[in-house]
Image (cartoon, rainbow, N blue to C red):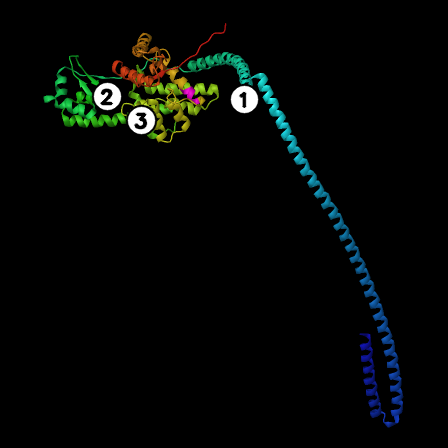
Amino acid sequence: MAIVLSVVIGAVALAVGALLGYTIKVRVGKGRVEGAERNAAAILDEAKAKERETLLEAKEEAIRLRSQAEAEFRGRQENIQRQEQRVASKEESLDRKLENQERRVQEVAEQRTQLSEEKERVEELRQKQIKEIERVARLTADEARDLLLKELDEEIRDDASRRLRVIEAETKEKADLRAREILAASMQRLTTDVVGETTVSVVPIPSDEMKGRIIGREGRNIRALEAATGVDLIIDDTPDAVALACFDPVRREIARVALTRLVQDGRIHPTRVEEMVEKARKEVEDTIIEAGEEASIEAKCAGIHPEVLKTFGRLKYRMSYGQNQLQHAVESAHIAGMLASELKADVDVCRRGALLHDLGKAIDHDVEGTHALLGAELARRFKVNDKIVHCIEAHHDEVEPSTVEAVIVQIADAVSGARPGARQETLEFYIKRLEALESVANEFEGVEKAFAIQAGREIRVIVKPETIDDIDAMRLARDVSKKIEESLDYPGQIKVTVVRETRAVEYAR
């Protein structure tokens, strides 16, 4: 590159000199040509000198660049050689590691083989020992294990039974005392009348002449009244009174109101009978709704579904052994609320469950089934809380109680129904009814004992297992239930449970 530059500079210098010479010739004239030529020669000499200097500088630069390039090349060559040496050493190291790894793998394989052989020898020795032990003990391994587990299980059971008895005794002692305190406090806080209402089934009339008007020509008035109300009118020799007979207390109340108004009005004929019955039905329905609402407010259970309250209010005309069922429900709600507050349970669930626990009694005349299950089904249909529904269906053990609230409702129901003066049934009559129930079951062959429980709502029949088998037990339950239906009068339904069991008894002497 320096050489080319020198040549270019020289060419430029020549061009400049020629130009100067020509200029000098033109301007100065021929007289100055010689001077110009001398100057041009001087310039040329100077240009040549510069050219030589430039060439020398270019050569020096080329030599310097070459030396620099050679030095860089040598450095890179040395670096490559060092890297090649490192790679070679790494390859040697990897080769040595690979050889060591292969050797270790081979050693591990040999060790595994040796371990397998050792395990086989140990297993052979173990089997020989087991066989020898079995021969000496005359027991197989499974039999020995079962024997050991059986002894251990018996020991644990005995220890657990002893501990459980101690805990149960302590708990029962404390629980009985606490339960008595809670029940006493709850019953003391509840002060209500102890005489229940009775159902009015007799309508007074001003004179015996009114009986003829009630009957009507060829009995058309009494037939119209019975057809409109579904109630049987009993007109006999009883002076100044007409009796009403019907299993449905609401229909009986409608008939009572209608007949009372007809007697007061004096105009008795089929058309008038139908009008009065319709007015009485509407009045009784309004009374039922009002009674249900008042009972819910009194029991502090506002917000119950209107259809549930409408059905619940029918209990105003339902009696059980002289105890009004609506008052019984409200009283049970108060007792359940107090018990729940003492036991830290859900007070609202207990109140509502106890208030509605006999809801099924309002419809059990029309629908087949127990009042507990009927009431639960009705409450469930109108989206009543599941906890409350469970209290309803479990209060007579048709469903096993699974919550504290359900048990509290059972207790409240029992306290309200069993307290002194709550019901008109005497103790003597109650005992006779239970004895009659037990005697019906004892009449059958193969029956060992019979027990009436749940206030006569259930009877447990214990049979002789050597006389009655499982199929006969089912047949006996059906026969006892039919016999009870035919020979006894009772409210609701009675559950018949036949128990057949085989017991093995031995004495340690």
* Residue 299 at least partly seen: no
CA gap between label 3 and label 1 equals 66 Å
Q: Which residue is tagged 2?
A: 252
Left or right: 231 as drawn, with respect to 34: left
Residue 137, placed above or below residue 18: above
Q: Amino acid at mark 2?
A: Arg
| Residue found at the far top of this picture | 509
Chain part drawn in magenta = 405-409
Between tags 1 and 2, which lies in front?
Answer: 1
Mark 3 or 2, nearer chain start: 2
Q: Is residue 79 left or right of residue 404?
A: right
**Quarter of the figure with residue 389:** top left
Q: Chief secondary structure of the magenta span?
A: helix
Q: Nearer the viewer, mark 3 or mark 1?
A: 1
> Whole-Å distance between the Cαs marked 3 and 2?
16 Å
Residue 144 drawn at (x, y percent)? 56, 19
> Which numbered dot is residue 142?
1
For disc 3, the neighbor class at 10 Å (few under 14, some 14 to 19, many from 20) is: many
Residue 258 position in % (x across, y down): 20, 23
Residue 66 in the magenta stretch? The answer is: no
Q: Is residue 256 visible?
A: yes
